[in-house]
Image (cartoon, rainbow, N blue to C red):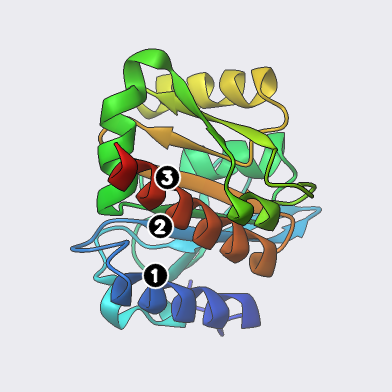
Amino acid sequence: MASEPAEIEILLAELGRSCYAKGWVMGTSGNFSAVLDRDPFSLTITSTGLDKESLTPEQFVRVDAAGTVTGGTGRPSAETALHLVAARARRAGAVLHTHSVWSTIVSRLHVRKQGLWIEGYEMLKGLEGVSSHTHREWLPILENDQNMPRLSAMVETTLRQHADAHGFLLGGHGLYTWGENLPQAKRHLEIFEFLLEAVGRTL
């Protein structure tokens, strides 16, 4: 089911290599996706078990709205279900998941509170719709779970409850964020990674 890489897959591969260089997706961690079409729905996502340092556009798998593979090589990550939830619940055009040290530390420290408020940082203005450093951003944190149907249902409920959230953390796992397109999702990723490091170092 191999096919020629789409332009968005070339850009996602470049982003994956950049995130590896920043230390945000070490080992085989992290995954990146983008919506190729809405009707019929098609999402491209990194294959599972890949070293992001050498990620290529050919290492993406295409799935439908149910997560069934429709193209590409390899196997989609089990976390594809979480990407599909964000694409549906937020109408996201791209969903990015990293495993940085600071996102993991902060998620562990605050998971019992089910989230944390981030406020007072100028960098908050990089989040879509935010125009002042006085903005209070609630970043939900969910307990990690290897049962993906159960976890994806929890994520969907959380996104409905916190309609203004630009991302969420999984405890001991990492960050998920998104955007209506890849540039916006990339910006949100960079903003959150900065903020989580600032919060973590302060703590």
Q: Considering depth in this image, is 178 or 85 the residue closer to the camera? A: 178
Mark before the other along the chain sequence, 3 or 2: 2
Q: Nearer the viewer, mark 1 or mark 2?
A: 2
Tell me the residue that label 1 is attached to: 73
Residue 47: x %, y % from top left: 37, 62
Relative to residue 5, is residue 35 depicted above or below? above
Q: Position of residue 92 (x, y in %)?
A: 70, 49
SS at mark 1 in the image: loop
CA neighbours of label 3 inside 10 A, class few (<14), some (14 to 19), many (20+): many
State the residue at coordinates (62%, 76%).
Answer: 8
Q: Give the mark nearest the N terminus, 3 or 1.
A: 1
Q: Is residue 176 left or right of residue 86?
A: left
Residue under label 3: 175
- Amino acid type at image mark 1: Thr
The local crowd at label 2, few if under 14, some if 14 to 19, many if 20 or more residues have their Cα within 10 Å, is many
Give how far across and how far down residue 73 sits, in percent.
39, 70
Q: Earlier in the sequence, mark 1 or mark 2?
A: 2
Name the element at disc 3: strand
**How far separated are the C-alphas under marks 3 and 1?**
26 Å
Amino acid type of the residue tagged 2 in the rendering: Asn
Q: Mark 3 or 1, which is nearer the eye?
A: 3
> Which class describes the residues within 10 Å of circle 1: few (<14), some (14-19), or many (20+)?
some
Q: Residue at x 48, y 45 (%)?
A: 176
Q: Are marks 3 and 2 in contact (CB under 8 Å)?
A: no
Nearer the observer: mark 3 or 2; the answer is 3
- Mark number for residue 166? none
Q: Residue at x 28, y 42 (%)?
A: 104
Q: Distance of mark 1 from mark 2, alpha carbons?
A: 15 Å
Residue 33 falls left or right of residue 163: left
Spatial CA distance of label 3 from label 2 is 11 Å
